[in-house]
Amino acid sequence: MHDLSITATHSQRILEHIANVTGLLKGIDISNAVGLSYKATIDALNTLLNQGRVARIGAKSATRWTGVVVDCAPMRLEDYWHGRRAPHPPGGSPRSGTRP
């Protein structure tokens, strides 16, 4: 059974390291930099991935890890839908089936 405080501490150390490094990182490089075993590092990275705090690119031995960029400017749901809506054809509604 994992001690939650140890897992949280590992995650914090990994997040701090990822925040200070630009680019994509291998799990073994993160492990060496923060002084954790590879297994503990991967467990913490998977926990952070599930929380949406890091991103994983690739699979197996080609996996690279990076921090997640958070958009600081939230958009209202109404603005999102209005901004994505396709324009109506001139002189008709999209459901009318009529063309000018």
Image (tube, helix red, strand yellow):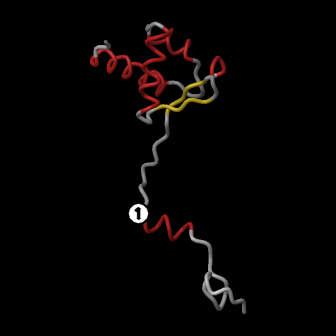
Mark 1 surroundings: few (<14), some (14-19) or many (≥20) residues within 10 A: few
Q: Which residue is mark 1?
A: 76
Q: Is residue 46 above or below residue 93?
A: above
- Residue drawn at the location 46% of the way across and 7% of the way down: 37
- Side of 2 where 89 appears, left or right: right
**Residue 55 place in picture, x, y as percent:** 53, 32
Which residue occupies the extreme right position in the image? 100
**Residue 79 place in picture, x, y as percent:** 46, 67
Q: Disc 1 marks which amino acid?
A: Arg
**Residue 15 place in picture, x, y as percent:** 42, 25
Of 83 and 95, nearer the camera is 95
- Residue drawn at the location 32% of the way across and 21% of the way down: 8
For the C terminus, give its image quadrant: bottom right
Q: Quadrant of residue 23?
A: top right
- Residue drawn at the location 34% of the way across and 18% of the way down: 7
Q: Is residue 77 above or below residue 90?
A: above
For the N terminus, give its image quadrant: top left
**Residue 24 place in picture, x, y as percent:** 60, 26
Of 83 and 49, nearer the camera is 49
Badge 1 marks a residue whose secondary structure is loop
- Side of 82 where 91 appears, left or right: right
- Side of 53 where 83 appears, left or right: right
Q: How many marks?
A: 1
Q: Is residue 68 above or below residue 83?
A: above
Q: Quadrant of residue 4?
A: top left
- Residue drawn at the location 42% of the way across and 26% of the way down: 47
Q: Is residue 71 above or below residue 66?
A: below
